[in-house]
Amino acid sequence: MKVKRNSRRASKTTGDIEVSKKNTTSYARLRKEIYEEWKKRWNYTTHFCRSACKIALAILNGWRKRARKGESKEKPVAKKLFMQLDPELYKFYGDKIRISVKPRQFIFIDLKFGEYQKRFIETWKEGKLKVGESTINEKKIVIPFKKEVDMSNPKDWIAIDVNESNVTAVSSNPHILRIDTKELRTIHTAYFNVVREIQKLSKEHPRIAERLMGKYSGRRRRKAMDACHKIANEVVKFAKEHNMGIVMEDLKFIRKCINRSRTLNRRLHSWNFRKLQFYVEYKAKMNGIPVVYVNPKKTSSLCPVCGGRLAANGHRLLKCEWGYVNDRDIITCLNLLRMRGVSVAPESLLMTAREERIMIKY
Ligand SMILES: [Zn+2]
């Protein structure tokens, strides 16, 4: 968060002791080299020396890396003065901060902030956020808010199945989320046809063909990735709303069976599946949602109620010998939950695709 401050004092601790001449690369050496002089000049709490050394080293080492690659020649000079305060050095009060300068000596700085920042401060007051290492320059104070999330124990779990025409998510609590992915397939097939035309061209005009190919495959990839992002966002939003962890099929096992088949549909399915799974996982982690994987073996051939074999029963439906009938994607999800050892509410077992919650367009 950026907070305007109304005082300009206390920003002089990142000083101008030159360290680049000595080729220092370690924090300990740098601190040893400058500490005496630093203490003579400023006599602030030693924490400030530590912070100044850390910043100076980060700048220096970044520069050395670039210099080795030949990207940067001139030695770095700290033009804009700023300092970093770890939580030991300052105390946040919501509308002001208190900075420790020396033992038992403080500077108070009143904070100016807008509506956006205010929301974070209110949440902080409720004890739901913590403040992290703050940065101060001559114009503003940046105070990061941290949220601690429990990634270990969600109340419920949601299993996700990706197939050629949709993404189905079934939760243990019970909810179904179904996202139509036919358009994702259309993106692929449309471009697949274009690519075939370009290939025909390549014998006579190899250069033009190459350029076109680059253009169209890039466009296809971007469109498909965009669609995958949107689908993953929906899945993660759904899991977050219901405080659920995510169960997915382990790709190690999927790879074996998919790569053997050569049809376009299967190949695209595997492409989409991997991308989607990747996006779902990282978006979930950003939101503090745990993700686990299970071996998908037999998830679509056994009954989630009795464990017996399932037989086809009309379009996309499966039925067991005791009469349990459900959509095959939902059955896959239910089995994933069971294999993960998640206790599934009886209502979840009875949910059908007809009760699906949302469809998104992209
Ligand atoms: Zn059964």
Image (spheres, rainbow, N blue to C red):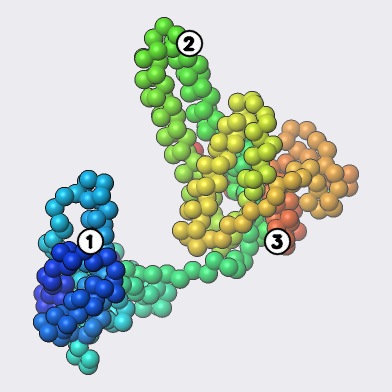
Which circle marks residue 60 in the picture?
1
Ligand 1 near label 1 (Cβ, under 8 Å)?
Answer: no
Residue of label 3: 342
State the separation of the CA atoms marked 2 and 1: 54 Å
In-image side of 233 versus 69 (left or right): right
- Quadrant of residue 338 within the rendered picture: bottom right
Q: Of the residues tagged 2 and 1, which is closer to the observer?
A: 1
Q: Position of residue 245 (x, y in %)?
A: 59, 60
Indicate the amino acid at tag 2.
Lys
Is the shortest distance between ligand 1 and the CB of mark 2 under 8 Å? Answer: no
Residue 71 image offset from top left, x and y in percent: 22, 46
Label 2, residues with CA under 10 Å away: few <14, some 14-19, many ≥20:
few
| Above-or-below relation of 206 to 77 | above
Q: Are marks 2 and 3 in contact (CB under 8 Å)?
A: no
Snapshot quadrant of residue 125 = bottom left
Q: Amino acid at mark 1?
A: Leu
Q: Is mark 3 within 8 Å of ligand 1?
A: no
Residue, disc 2: 200
Q: Is residue 73 visible?
A: yes
**Mark identifier at residue 75:** none
Q: Nearer the viewer's eye, disc 2 or disc 3?
A: 2
